[in-house]
Structure formats: C-alpha cells, structure tokens
C-alpha cells in the first residue's frame, strides 16, 4: 500500500527514492527497494486479480495491445538495447514492452505486461544473472512477445474472449495475426499500405491473381465503400463521418479461408473528403458490420489517451532499477495505480 500510495501521490518521476521521500518516516527507501527489487512476491496473481476486478466494474469491449517504448540512457537495466523505431525515425536506447489493455468506449486499463528481451540479454549468462532473468524465459521475437502477452491474459487466465485490437507500426502485424488467428482469437490488426495480400473475394476482378498490396486492393474496392459514423476522437465531440469497405483476402502464409478457419477480411477506412484508403486493417470478424469494426478500431485511440493522461502520470515507465522481477513488480503496481485513477474518473463521469 505504501508503494501504491507513492505512485499516486509523488510529484514528478516515481522512482523508489522519490516515493520514499514522499512517505517520510512511514517506510524506508531500503524497505521499498527490497519490496520491489529483491522480494519474491509473484506479480501474475496480482495482475489476474486486477483484470478480474476491472472486468467486474467496467463493460469490456476489447483487448487493446499497445507496444511501449521506455527510453533508457544506461545499458544495465534489463532488456535495454538500441532499436530503430519507424514512427520516430531514429535509433533509441530503450526497453520495449507490450501492454494488454482492457478497453471500453469511455475508459481503459492495462492488465498484463510482457518485457521484450533481445537475444543479447538471454544468451549471455552473465548479463542474465546480473538482472535475475529466470531460466524459463525464452528467446522470442517482438511479434512472439505480443502473441504470448495476449494468450497469457485470455487463455491462461481464462478471461473473457473479446477482439484483440492492435494498431502499431512498431511490430510486424501479419505474423501476430497469423498466430492469434490460428489460436481462435477474434482480431482487428492494422497493416501497412504495402502489405502483400491475395484477394479471394469474387467481388473484385483480381481474385486469385496473386499478391497485391493492401492499398492496391482497397483502391480497386473504392466502389464497395459505404458511409459509417463513429464517435469523435475526444469524448463529447462531434461524430466523425467515414467511408469503409471490406474485401475477403488471404495473407501469403495464411491458409485459404474455409469453414473451419473463418473469413479473413481487409478493412479499409477513410475520413469523408480525405485520402482513400486512410487506414487499413486485417480482421477475422467476418460477421461484424464495417461500422462496428470502425468503432472497435477507435479503442486504440482510447488507450493512447489513457496512457498519456493516467498511466504515464502514475509512473508506468519510471522504474529506476535493473532487475527483471523489479520491472514486473513496479509495472504491476503502476497498473493498479492506473486502475484506481481510471475507475474514480469513470465513476465521476457517470450520469
């Protein structure tokens, strides 16, 4: 409770030292350091309980997957490495993490986290021992890291199955889609305009003629567009008019759609009067109307806002230690602090 209070009340960076300074004589910096960095309490049951509590309090529409960049100047914190980030257009020394958020139209909260560990950390016994990475943590790609974070939350914890929404240029979308699709998960995943896909929709003359880019497919499907309206980007703002179209496709390494796999659709979305297509999504929600899929995609914006307005302010990226377990314990308690603030705000906004 002391650490949670510190995350909620400490001004500025939520380091162990700053939290201890706020709490004064109530708890020492050494005790906080031990509680987070070297104690043995397991963060997984805490996250699972946090997720269950959230779902009981807020209607769950989707799981939103959000990759997170945590810049680090030093090289000794677990997982730190140099990465090129396409959205920033530069190389940064940083940790990379995957957050799985429970999202509704009005509020969201992180329920699970997975820290991406580059091979250099996992194949070097000395570095691994210095930050206490457990023996069972495997080498995995960033895409595999995303998949495991999702499956742990829903399959292992037996949480409700809802669509997974992923809108990020920092990860390779198709491998993630393939693996979660094979696991039977409902999906809405953004793809790049140059993503190669094969049309299998008889509505287009290019069906079965080999891979085309997602943009080329949607340009050919322009006459299939239908108008949809979604809520404004900020609560209480004017609804936004869009165009949307869907085309039945198969990704290069996906099996052909069939009765046992369900359809795979490319969803194109563009603002009224804007560029077509503006945004492209791969989905297996074949029975979901395009208007509902567009509204579902906006939950990624909801998570972005809540991350900036709440999660960052309670120190989700402020862990100042080095250890694997310390990072997970801090992030778990920061998620709990986020939940406290988000639920209070949501209750206050109810009529």
Image (cartoon, rainbow, N blue to C red):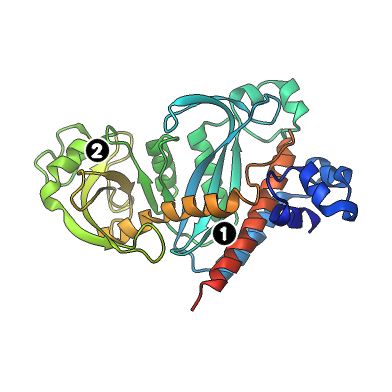
Query: In this view, which residue lies farthest toward the right?
Result: 25
Q: Position of residue 181 (x, y in %)?
A: 40, 47
**Which of the 4 quarters of the picture holds residue 167?**
top left
Residue 26 drawn at (x, y percent): 88, 56
Image position of 83 with respect to 32: above or below: above
Residue positioned 70% across, 30% down in the render? 77
Secondary element at image label 2: helix
Q: Is residue 58 above or below residue 139?
A: below
Q: Residues within 10 Å of mark 2 (few under 14, many from 20)?
A: many
Q: Which disc, if any, is residue 158?
A: 1
- Which sits in the foreground, 103 or 126? 103
Question: Quarter holding the N terminus?
Answer: bottom right
Q: Nearer the viewer, residue 338 or 254?
A: 338
Q: Is residue 238 left or right of residue 310?
A: left
Q: Nearer the viewer, residue 26 or 253?
A: 26
Q: Could you give the CA–CA distance between mark 1 and mark 2, rounded to whole angstroms?
A: 34 Å
- Going by the image, does 307 lie left or right of 14? left
Q: Which residue is mark 2?
A: 214
Rendering coords of residue 144 (x, y %): 51, 36
User: Is 248 on the left-hand or right-hand side of 6?
Assistant: left
User: Residue 243: where, in percent of width, then height?
Assistant: 20, 54
On residue 123, which mark appears? none
Residue 217 is at least partly visible in this image: yes
Q: Residues within 10 Å of mark 1 (few under 14, many from 20)?
A: few
- Name which residue lies at 54% across and 53% down: 309
Element under label 1? Answer: loop
Name which residue lies at 25% across and 36% down: 197
The earlier-in-sequence mark between 1 and 2 is 1
């Amino acid at each position: 409770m002391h650490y949670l209070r510190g995350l909620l009340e400490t001004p500025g960076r939520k380091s162990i030292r700053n939290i201890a300074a706020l709490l004064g004589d109530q708890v020492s910096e050494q005790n906080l350091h031990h509680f987070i960095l070297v104690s043995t309490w397991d963060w997984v049951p805490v996250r699972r309980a946090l997720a269950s509590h959230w779902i009981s309090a807020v209607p769950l529409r989707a799981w939103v997957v959000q990759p997170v960049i945590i810049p680090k100047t030093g090289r000794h914190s677990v997982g730190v490495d140099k990465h090129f980030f396409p959205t920033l257009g530069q190389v940064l020394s940083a940790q990379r993490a995957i957050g799985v958020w429970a999202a509704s139209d009005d509020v969201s909260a992180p329920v699970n986290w997975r820290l991406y560990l580059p091979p250099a950390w996992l194949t070097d016994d000395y570095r691994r021992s210095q930050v206490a990475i457990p023996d069972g943590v495997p080498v995995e790609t960033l895409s595999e890291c995303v998949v495991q974070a999702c499956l742990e939350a829903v399959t292992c914890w037996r949480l409700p199955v809802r669509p997974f929404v992923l809108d990020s240029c920092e990860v390779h979308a198709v491998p993630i889609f393939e693996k979660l699709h094979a696991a039977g998960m409902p999906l809405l995943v953004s793809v790049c305009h140059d993503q190669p896909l094969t049309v299998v929709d008889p509505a287009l003359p290019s069906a079965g003629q080999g891979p085309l880019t997602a943009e080329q497919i949607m340009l050919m499907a322009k006459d299939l567009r239908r108008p949809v309206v979604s809520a404004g980007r900020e609560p209480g703002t004017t609804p936004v008019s869009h165009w949307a179209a869907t085309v039945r496709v198969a990704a290069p390494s996906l099996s052909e759609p069939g009765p046992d796999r369900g359809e795979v659709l490319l969803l194109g979305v563009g603002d009224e009067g804007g560029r077509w297509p503006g945004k492209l999504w791969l989905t297996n929600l074949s029975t979901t109307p395009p208007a509902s899929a567009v509204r579902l995609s906006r939950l990624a914006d909801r998570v972005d806002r809540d991350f900036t307005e709440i999660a960052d302010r309670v120190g989700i990226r402020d862990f100042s230690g080095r250890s694997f377990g310390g990072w997970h314990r801090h992030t778990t308690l920061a998620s709990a602090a986020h939940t406290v603030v988000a639920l209070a705000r949501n209750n206050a906004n109810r009529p």
